[in-house]
């Protein structure tokens, strides 16, 4: 996968990270569904709202619950590395990031986004990520089901770009020497 993130050997401090993204109004609809259910979840929870321009946060008093409107890439990379389970959309870039980080996730495709629906279902059938639909979404049920879901790592796809470039240079050098 092409990802801006790298897997780091950090301890998993967070039980659940919710990573919201996508077009409105579906982003807000899903956020409201989650906000209505988050108080039922125990553990340390981080909620990243995907709103870089927002200046207010939801006010829910719950021990271990932290909200962010947005996080810079470096902080988000560390947060995801420190998360046991992630709830997020099934966008292509997000999926590549999750695979690169080797993280367990519950994918919830954006309704009406056929490519997200396809990717989520395909990855669910392959045992890579658990998937749930936004309609009638239950955070507790999805988390419970994900505990018995046998997440399979899709394999190591990390590409050593510098090694490939070195090999290309050697091939070009050999061709020049034979001409």
Image (cartoon, rainbow, N blue to C red):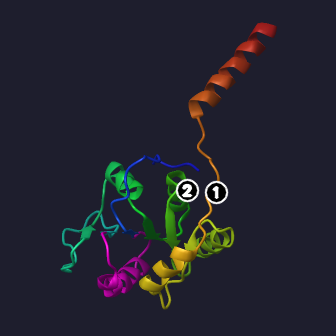
Q: Position of residue 150 (x, y in %)?
A: 61, 69
Q: Which residue corresponds to the image point at 53% horizontal and 55% vertical from the top-left?
A: 102
> Tag 1, which secondary structure?
loop
Q: Are marks 2 and 1 in contact (CB under 8 Å)?
A: yes
Question: Which segment is the magenta one?
Answer: 20-44
Instruction: Say above or below: 49 vs 179.
Output: below
Q: Is residue 149 left or right of residue 78?
A: right
Q: CA distance from mark 2 to mark 1?
A: 7 Å
Q: Position of residue 139 (x, y in %)?
A: 43, 82
Q: Is residue 27 left or right of residue 173?
A: left
Which label sits on residue 154? 1
Of the numbered discs 2 and 1, the one sitting upstream in the chain is 2
The residue to which callout 2 is attached is: 99
For the C terminus, give its image quadrant. Answer: top right
Helix, strand or loop: magenta stretch: helix
Q: Which quadrant of the figure has residue 87?
A: bottom left
Q: Position of residue 47 (x, y in %)?
A: 32, 70
């Amino acid at each position: 996968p092409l990802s801006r993130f790298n897997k780091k050997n950090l301890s998993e401090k967070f039980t659940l990270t919710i990573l919201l993204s996508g077009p409105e109004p579906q982003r807000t609809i899903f956020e409201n569904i989650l906000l209505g259910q988050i108080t039922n979840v125990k553990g340390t929870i981080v909620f990243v709202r995907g709103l870089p321009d927002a200046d207010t946060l939801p006010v829910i008093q719950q021990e271990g619950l932290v909200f962010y409107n947005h996080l810079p890439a470096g902080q988000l990379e560390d947060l995801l590395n420190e998360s046991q389970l992630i709830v997020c959309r099934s966008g292509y870039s997000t999926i590549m990031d999750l695979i690169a980080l080797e993280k367990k996730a519950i994918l919830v495709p954006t309704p009406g986004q056929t490519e997200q629906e396809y990717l989520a279902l395909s990855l669910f059938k392959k045992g890579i990520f658990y998937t749930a639909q936004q309609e009638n979404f239950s955070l507790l049920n999805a988390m419970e089901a994900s505990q018995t879901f046998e997440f399979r790592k899709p394999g190591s796809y990390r590409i050593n770009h510098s090694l490939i470039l070195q090999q290309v240079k050697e091939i070009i050098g050999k061709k020049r020497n034979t001409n």
